[in-house]
Image (spheres, helix red, strand yellow):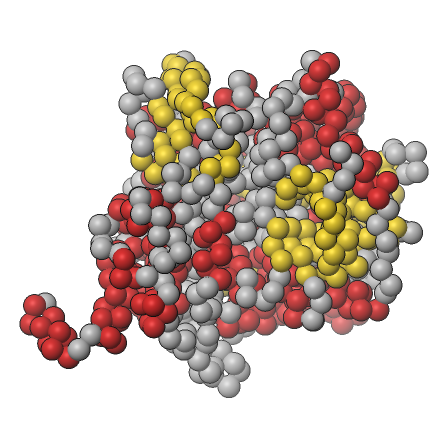
Amino acid sequence: MTRASFKVWRTDDSGGGHFADYTVDVVPGMVVLDAIHQIQATAAPDMAVRWNCKAGKCGSCSAEINGNPRLMCMTRLNTLNQLEPITVEPMRAFPPIKDLVTDVSWNFRVKQTITPFTPRPADAPDGTWRMRQQDVDRVQEFRKCIECFLCQDVCHILRDHHLHDEFIGPRFLTFAAALEMNPLDAADRVPALKEQHGIGYCNITRCCTKVCPEHITITENAIIPLKERVVDRYFDPVTKLFRMFQS
Amino acid sequence: MNTFETLDYDVLVIGAGGAGLRAAIEASAAGVKVGLICKSLLGKAHTVMAEGGVAAALANVDDRDSWKVHFADTMRGGQYVNNWRMAELHAREAPDRVRELEAWGAVFDRTKDGRILQRNFGGHRYPRLAHVGDRTGLELIRTLQDYGIHRGIDVHMEFTVVSLLTSSGQAAGVIGYERERGRFKVFRAGAVVLATGGAGRAYQITSNSWEGTGDGHALAYQAGADLMDMEFIQFHPTGMIWPPSVRGILVTEGVRGEGGILLNKEGRRFMFDDIPDAYKNQTATDEEEGWRYTQGDKSAKRPPELLTRDHVARCIMREVKAGRGSPHGGVFLDIAWIKKKLRNADEHIKRKLPSMYHQFKELGDIDITKEPMEVGPTTHYIMGGIRVDGDSQMSSIPGLFAAGECAAGINGANRLGGNSLSDLLVFGKRAGEHAAAFVKTHSRAGVDDAQAARAMGDALRPFDAAAGGGENPFTIQTALQDMMQRHVGIVRNEAEIQQALVELEALKVRAARAAVTGHREYNPGWHTAIDLSNLLTVSEAISRSAIERKESRGGHFREDYPDRKPEYATFNIVTRRKADGSMEVVRVPLPPMPDELKQIIEEQKA
């Protein structure tokens, strides 16, 4: 059996924090969350961490591993350099609560501000709708989102510029896209995307897409099409023509 | 110290998985004030893990399906100890609950003519599971969550309930603490709905998340409610077994529904070796027919891989015990073989089973479009639970309701895949509706502050125990899981279950001395100590019920009584707390089934 060392962020009672050193016994196939659990069960029972499914389906165990936003349950130790200590720290775009746990409640408040799904009248007399799989595929990509908030964590508009009051972030642009592109939805979110949700702030650095554990193409498939809808609605015809020639 | 904030609701729902969310939505629609408590963040409940689909006789893919066939399939799967009224309501109402989800924003996979697509699953006679690839649970919980947040429901996230409060024998509210700061709160309510899910964390190898510690079962039991049929635990036949750190994580039955086959180390498709008499007429006679069934040929019968979960799990155990297992102690599940039958099989597998592809690739470094998976049984679901009225979901305590996995009845001795998500919707709605009606027609019971203070004191005891050098709660929890796995697992016998009861007494003594370090704020050691007490209660109920049932039926297999006994089909086994605090076990006769339902079962046996 081999051993690996970890540096895990622990908050101090004063509100600050430090990296604490731990050593972990490594077994085949082990992931970072297993290591955290081993530390919890043996050395630090009060170490705070969120997790639920341990299979990449719930999005609870988001953290920054060696500086990269990842799910702890989906990060195998054999994909990391075990000769150096592995650092595990909380998401840095959200206020710390304790150790690896941050206050993500802002995300839940943001979601409530987005106009909910509003279906068109039913297609069939029995109150049901008809949709083609290929139309559904487009939305299903966004609905894979497990709300781990890693895309929010890595978005520089939130992480560095703290524009939480003006920008809903990639997760909720994707959420808005899922609603806007739902073949049944009849609501219009385009004005809100421009005015309240701050879509203009996104300058397509693709950081969100790179960290998405569900491999959702957030930037190209969700945000850019929404930006185009905003542009089509609000920009003058000359600009539209210019764009047509460019593409 | 003995102070706590107090909040008032008409209906308080404990648990925000599918059943809890659906109950909260329904109660809110009835115009009452609703509070919803989640143990984790909203949307992270175990419902997200459900993969295969939601069972509902929409008859979109096979027009021979109907509520009657679904009812008969459910009763046969549950080996006739189900609450027939719940099985009937479930089969009748599931299609409406699924259509309603679509109206709330769920996006299911489609048939060629644009309706909701349905897939094959174990024990279901026709393709019946509405699904979204293999992430149906996520679709369901997200739809309910996103619909529910606009309905004026107060959501209390990361809040742990430690005790159910009663007054004059009626539910009055709960006391618990918010995890972030460790502060206690009392919620007063006219009616309480328990929707806390399962108890799989009583076992070492489980598909359940940390939350599945039988909280609702234990809260209801401690308050004096009846638990029913707790011996019926479902061991899902296909959990991951390698690498060790992922052992127990689920591999959806959808793999078999899409044509996946089970092989032993000799490459033999062993499921053809033992087909139960009750299913002989509906099972394929050869491999070719089984394949045609999975591809939608209505004239073909289902492959034996799609027999009920209890049977498939036991067949896998038989292969392993006979030395014909895979290198890591399971068997092989192969979907890659369909490339012999389908062009673009790789793409087909990735589209139909995206999460499974992803899960094996990232956790096991295995490409399931090319290689077989290694799988073995994992603790998945508890069919037993809080005994409720079939129509209203009210427990034996007035004003206390239960829905979803923590309630008993619909599944009998074994749950069919896909019946869990439909159960959540059908009975979540009913519980919410009847809880709201109860509030409107009954005067409220007051909360006794002394009762709340006692519960708070009990919950804080692990902090005092630290001074005496008490034991780490994680160590005790591991010991309990190991013990239950060995003594009250897939194959049981009297001597081992009796031994479990002896060891449970010793574990209770250790748990009483469990000690935690640090402060109350977001302290996992403390949560584990509280979960432990619930797990011990549930484990005792499982063990005592398992001793009482001296036969083998569904998820309960006794090697000392390997056959089913007809007299055991006439009652349910109920556990309840006696005045002296000990657990009593009683047999409660099953209510007689109406003739028209009996007739449906007979008709469907053909």
- Which residue lies at the image location 61% right of the left edge and 37% below the top edge? B181
Residue B306 rendering spot, x and y as whole percentages = 52, 51
Q: Is residue B515 visible?
A: yes
- Which residue lies at the image location 31% right of the left edge and 67% below the top edge? A194
Direction from residue A132 to residue B273 in the image, left or right: right
Q: Residue furthest left?
A: A245
Direction from residue A119 to residue B483 in the image, left or right: right
- Which residue lies at the image location 47% right of the left edge and 46% below the top edge? A104
Residue B41 sits above or below residue B410 on the image: above
Residue B224 sits above or below residue B491 on the image: below
Direction from residue A159 to residue B1 in the image, left or right: right
- Toward which corner of the image does residue B550 lie, by quadrant? top right
Residue B505 sits above or below residue B141 on the image: above
Q: Is residue B319 visible?
A: no
Residue B321 rendering spot, x and y as whole percentages = 55, 28
- Which residue lies at the image location 41% right of the left edge and 22% below the top edge? A19
